[in-house]
Image: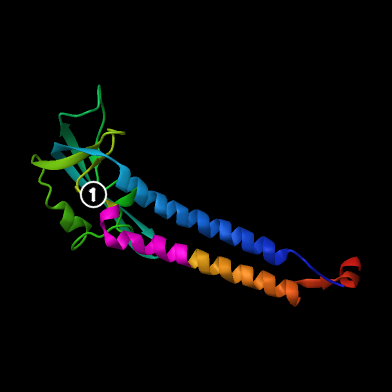
Amino acid sequence: MVRNSGLLECFGAVLMLALAGFSGYKWQRLLSAMSEVYDQKYCTVLNTTTDEWRAEGQKVCLPKVQINIVDDDRKNHTGETFAYKFLQGNSNSRVTTYEPDCYAWLKQFKIGGQVECWQSTSDPEVVKLDKTTLADQSSAYIEPIILTVFTIVTGCFIAFAYIHQSKQPGLLAQTDSESEA
């Protein structure tokens, strides 16, 4: 008698959980960006800077503007405040684009000048410099859609392989005599 070793099911379940979790995380980032409410404010530019690092062999940058918020919603605030294009996690050059690059994008913010900015109503520490959100950029949907489709296709493939294996045992199947030895 031939029985299934369970290796395929275990691998399939782990792969599906990982893919579904990562896909869900990408969708959650977009949905949270769409649901956040901001108050329009004016900010005085104190300084501009760019964080840089390498990821997967590519240079990644995160431009940020140090600001003072006019009519700040925070009470008794001390310390520095940085504003980003969108939410900080959605503002590096791997997630969004800067034309022509991060440094040129920062040149529009003159030290001492006032610019429009948007302060989060639920978390006043969050200030962004673009009225739109990451969810307003069509390119932001490419990765979550591809991940979702890949997850569904992978799930169908694993289900097909499991059904096919249960009908015709393959490499992962063992006979009772092999498992008793």
Task: List the single residue furthest toward the top.
Answer: 76
As for residue 40 lying within the magenta part, the answer is no
Q: Position of residue 105 (x, y in %)?
A: 17, 55
Judged by its main secondary structure, the magenta piece is helix
Q: Position of residue 84 (x, y in %)?
A: 24, 46
Question: Residue 171, can we see it?
Answer: no
Task: List the single residue furthest toward the left.
Answer: 113
- Image quadrant occupied by the N terminus: bottom right
Determine which residue is flagged by label 1. 85
- Image quadrant occupied by the C terminus: bottom right
11 or 99: nearer the viewer: 11
Mark 1: amino acid: Lys
Above or below 147: residue 177: below
Residue that appears at 57% across and 69% down? 156
Along the horizontal axis of the image, is 97 left or right of 162? left
Q: Secondary structure at mark 1?
A: loop
**Colour approach in the figure:** rainbow
Along the horizontal axis of the image, is 111 left or right of 74? left
Q: Position of residue 68 (x, y in %)?
A: 17, 34
Question: Residue 11, can we see it?
Answer: yes
Above or below 16: residue 156: below
Above or below 81: residue 164: below
Q: Residues within 10 Å of mark 1 (few under 14, many from 20)?
A: many
Location of residue 161 (image quadrant): bottom right
Q: Position of residue 151 (x, y in %)?
A: 51, 64
Location of residue 137 (image quadrant): bottom left
Total marks placed = 1
Q: Which residues are magenta?
A: 135-149
61 or 30: nearer the viewer: 30
Residue that appears at 11% across and 42% down? 115
